[in-house]
Image (spheres, grey):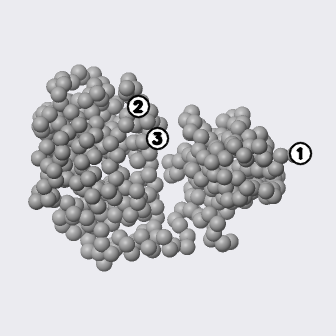
Amino acid sequence: MIRKPLALPDLMLRSPSPNRNQIAAHIAVAPNIKLQFPSALRFVFVCFTNRCGSAYLGDLLASTGRFQHAGESFNSDEVLALCREHGLASFADYFAQIVRRDARDDRYIVKVAPEQLRLLVEAGILGQIIEQSEFLHVSRADKLAQSISRSIAEQNNRWAWDSPVGLSDDKLVYSPVHIAEHVEAITNHDRCFALFFALNGIVPIEVRYERLVSQPQQELDEVARRLGLPSLQVDPTKLRYRRQANEVNETWRTRFLLETELPGGVSFAGAPTGQTATIGAPAHATATVQNAVKADLLAHVHNIGDITGDCGDWIGKPKSGLWIEGFSITPRLGIAAQDIEYQASQNNGLVFPWISGGGFCGTRGLSMPLQGMRVCLRGAAEQAYECLHTAAFLDGSTVGPVAAGQLCQSASMAPLEAFQIVIRPKSR
C-alpha cells in the first residue's frame, strides 16, 4: 500500500532545487493535467546522487537490450529546450512527450535527483503513476570516495570516462572544504530519498555501487528479480562506461584522512588537547560535573561545525547566536550504546525519531536550529542511573535540569544554543 496523496519530507523541501525552480519559473507545474498512459507501461526511476554509479547501472541495463539508456531528462535546460521546440506549456505535457519518445518494451527509465522527485510529486505526475512505478536507489557505502570523485569531476569536467579531459591531473586543486561540503550534500540527498520512501510506504530496490562494480551480473540479477523480469544478461561489448578513479583519488583520500584539522571547525572525538574545537560553558553554570558514566558528546553548531565534549560538560555557548543543529551521544564507560536514546525537535515542527547511542540526531549544514531535546535511559542503565539534562536557548533562557525523557525547550520555542547532560548513580 502506498500513501495517497504522496508526502514530501521537509528535508526535501528545504534542499537546494535549482532545476526544479528554473522549470517552475518558466512552465506550469500545477497538477491540473490528467495523464493517459497504457496500464502495461512501467516507470523505473533511478534515484541518484552525483558519482554514485547510476550512469554505470544505466549502461548495464541498456546493454541487455531491454531498456533505453537512463538519461537525466529532468534537467532544466533539457526540459525548457524541448518545451520551446514543441510549444509545451506544462511539465506534465513535457513528461508525456518524453515518455512517448523514450519508452521501450513497455518500460520508461529515467534518472531523478531529490529535487526532480519533488517536481514529479508537485506536478501531480507521480501520484497518477505510482502504482506503475519502481524506484532503484543507487548509493555508495564509501561516501568519502564519492565526494572526492565529485570534487575532481567538477574541476576537470570529466563526468564520464570517455569525456574530454578539461584539466590535467597535475592542475587539479585539493580542497578539504569542498570535499567535506560534498560529503554533506551527498548524505543529505540520500536522506531525502530515504525519508520520501519511508513516509510513503515505498520499498525501493537498493543498488550498491560497490557491489555493482565488483559483481555487475549478480547485482543485475537481483534488480531483474525485484522488477519481475526474466534474467537480464549484460553484453560487455555494448558497455560505454568505465571506472575513472586513479592515484589522484587515493592520494586525496589519504590526505583528507590524515588532516589534523577538518574544515569548518569540525573536530575529532577523543583528540588530544589543542586538536578539538571547544566552545565555553555558560558563565552561570559549573563547567563540568563528574559522572560515573563516560560518553563522547558531539554537537553540530551553526557556522562552527562539530564540537565535542564529555558527559557533564557544557556543549555550546549561550548568547553567541550560534545555534545547535544536531548532536550525538556515544557511551564509552558505564552504559551500553543501546541503553541511551535521545530525540530532538526543530522550529519547523519536525520531530526526529528516537536515536540510540552513537547515532546523529538532527541535520548538518542546513542552518536549521534544534528547538528542543530529550534524553532517556533504557534497560540496565535506567535501573542504575538517573539522567538529567539542562539547555540554554537563543532567547537567553536556561531550562532544567529536567528528568530523563522530558522535553527540554524554552517557553518562546527559541533555538538551542548549549546543553549539559549529567548521568549519575541513583540515590540508594
Q: 206 or 176, which lies in front?
A: 206
Q: Residues within 10 Å of mark 2 (few under 14, many from 20)?
A: some
Q: Residue at x 37, y 37 (%)?
A: 203
What amino acid is at disc 2? Asn
Q: Earlier in the sequence, mark 1 or mark 2?
A: 2
Up the image or down, 17 lies above or below 412; here it is: below
Judge whether residue 69 can be spotted in this image: no
- Residue 200's label in the rendered image is 2
Q: Which of pointers 3 and 1 indicates the residue nearer the eye?
A: 1
Q: Earlier in the sequence, mark 3 or mark 1?
A: 3
What amino acid is at disc 1? Arg
Q: Residue at x 56, y 46 (%)?
A: 362
Q: 170 or 319, which lies in front?
A: 170
Q: Residues within 10 Å of mark 3 (few under 14, many from 20)?
A: many
Q: How far, Cα to Cα, is label 3 from label 1?
A: 46 Å
Q: Which residue is mark 3?
A: 11
Q: Residue at x 57, y 50 (%)?
A: 359
What amino acid is at disc 3? Leu
Mark 3: secondary structure: helix
> Where residue 171 sits in the image (x, y, percent)?
31, 75
Q: Which of pointers 3 and 2 indicates the residue nearer the eye?
A: 2
Q: Quadrant of the N terminus?
A: top left
Q: Residue furthest right?
A: 428
- Residue 202 occupies which quadrant of the picture? top left
Mark 2: secondary structure: helix
